Image: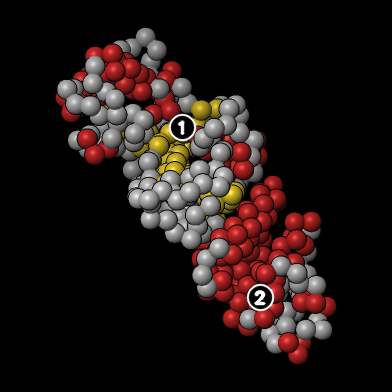
């Protein structure tokens, strides 16, 4: 039995029960009560197209299966994600050529992603959350040198991040903190804490903004992640990437501080400064890179080494996370800045958990990309 997805979704928001409705595939079946109530372009398209109805049926089945795997405390978030996905699909396809083909693409991609929302990493289960936010831009003339597409006039934010699916106080604290950190990391024009992803979009003046979280290491005591934001203007060719490390202590239920890694009385700052002086400074001194061309600029840039939000912790060592256009251009830095753990052992806290290789494999994120 085929399902009218828009009506099914409304049912899922208020109840865990799935009610089936039958869209008509031809005008002769227009008397069917469900399709007789179809008023939106999306509903009518599904009712009129057997191909769309079948694709819609697959999305509904995939969502039902994903919902059955998730812990109860994450179910509402999954429903919110489906709501956001549906709204974005309807808005995006409405301004594109080939409305039905656009919807088919969305349905196929979402069906695939729903099959990989749950992922085991480092002995823990993670549920990948995804959300979409769209808003109309202020009316503005198209610049002469701007090659815009049919999304001109709209801004969209796509965000994806993991949630611990184990339940309990530790998982709840991690889930709330990571999502809040990801939202607050992308807030153009918005001051103060960001309560919703709609606020995170800020003043709509970007064509597409992608916020994604990558898990670098999952251990017994901590989880290391990197938050990446890529806003792309309507007339921009490439996005400008910004990065922020998120190192979470599970038992303490807070982000990691320098004192959790290094012995406070040690000379850890000097070791980080040495890496800066030997690797970074020679590549930027005398050059106008991101406004860094004076001794004062170099001194200010050195402060990013002191901030745990710029420290990625993985099996190779402590790496420095940069933001393009804000700190430095990656094109002007000779490779990643990583200090091996062997060089830091004398100043590490005895309780610090050095990440072990292969737990999880760096960069393996099945549920994080795409729609």
Residue 320 visible in the snapshot = no
Does residue 144 appear to the left or right of 51 in the view shown?
left
Q: Based on the displayed image, in which of its 4 quarters is residue 337 positioned?
A: top left
Q: Residue at x 36, y 30 (%)?
A: 326
Q: Name the residue under label 2.
A: 46
Q: In this view, does 280 lie above or below 335?
A: above
Q: Position of residue 72 (x, y in %)?
A: 70, 51
Query: What is the residue that sits farthest to the top in this orientation?
Result: 265
- Name the one closer to the observer, 211 or 133: 133
Q: In this view, does 11 lie above or below 34?
A: above
Q: Based on the displayed image, in which of its 4 quarters is residue 303 positioned?
A: top left
- Name the one closer to the observer, 167 or 82: 82
Q: Measure the C-alpha gap from mark 2 to mark 1.
A: 45 Å
Quadrant including the N terminus: bottom right
Whichever of labels 2 and 1 marks the residue nearer the N terminus, that label is 2
Q: Residue 305 carries which label?
A: none
Q: Name the residue under label 1.
A: 247
Q: Position of residue 287 (x, y in %)?
A: 19, 26
């Amino acid at each position: 039995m085929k399902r009218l997805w828009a009506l099914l979704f409304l049912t899922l928001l208020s109840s865990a029960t799935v009610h089936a409705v039958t869209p008509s595939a031809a005008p002769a079946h227009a008397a069917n009560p469900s399709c007789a109530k179809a008023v939106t372009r999306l509903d009518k398209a599904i009712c009129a197209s057997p191909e769309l109805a079948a694709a819609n049926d697959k999305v509904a089945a995939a969502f039902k299966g994903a919902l059955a795997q998730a812990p109860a405390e994450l179910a509402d978030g999954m429903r919110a994600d489906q709501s956001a996905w549906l709204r974005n699909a309807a808005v995006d396809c409405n301004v594109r050529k080939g409305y039905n083909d656009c919807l088919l693409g969305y349905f196929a991609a979402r069906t695939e992603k729903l099959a990989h929302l749950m992922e085991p990493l480092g002995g823990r289960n993670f549920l990948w959350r995804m959300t979409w936010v769209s808003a109309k831009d202020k009316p503005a003339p198209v610049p002469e040198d701007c090659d815009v597409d049919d999304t001109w006039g709209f801004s969209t934010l796509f965000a994806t991040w993991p949630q611990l699916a184990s339940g309990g106080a530790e998982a709840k604290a991690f889930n709330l903190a990571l999502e809040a950190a990801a939202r607050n990391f992308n807030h153009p024009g918005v001051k103060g804490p960001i309560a919703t992803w709609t606020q995170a979009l800020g003043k709509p003046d970007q064509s597409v903004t992608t916020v994604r979280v990558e898990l670098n290491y999952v251990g017994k005591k901590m989880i290391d992640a990197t938050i990446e934001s890529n806003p792309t203007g309507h007339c921009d060719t490439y996005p400008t990437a910004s990065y922020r490390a998120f190192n979470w202590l599970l038992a303490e239920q807070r982000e990691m501080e320098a004192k959790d890694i290094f012995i406070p009385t040690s000379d850890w700052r000097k070791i980080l400064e040495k890496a800066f002086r030997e690797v970074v400074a020679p590549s930027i001194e005398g050059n106008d890179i991101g406004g860094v061309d004076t001794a004062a600029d170099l001194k200010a840039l050195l402060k990013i080494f002191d901030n745990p939000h710029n420290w990625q912790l993985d099996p190779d060592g402590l790496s420095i996370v940069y933001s393009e256009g804000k700190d430095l251009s990656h094109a002007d830095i000779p490779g990643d800045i990583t200090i091996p753990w062997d060089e830091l052992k004398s100043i590490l806290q005895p309780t610090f958990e050095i990440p072990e290789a292969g737990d999880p494999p760096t960069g393996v994120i099945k549920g994080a990309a795409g729609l």
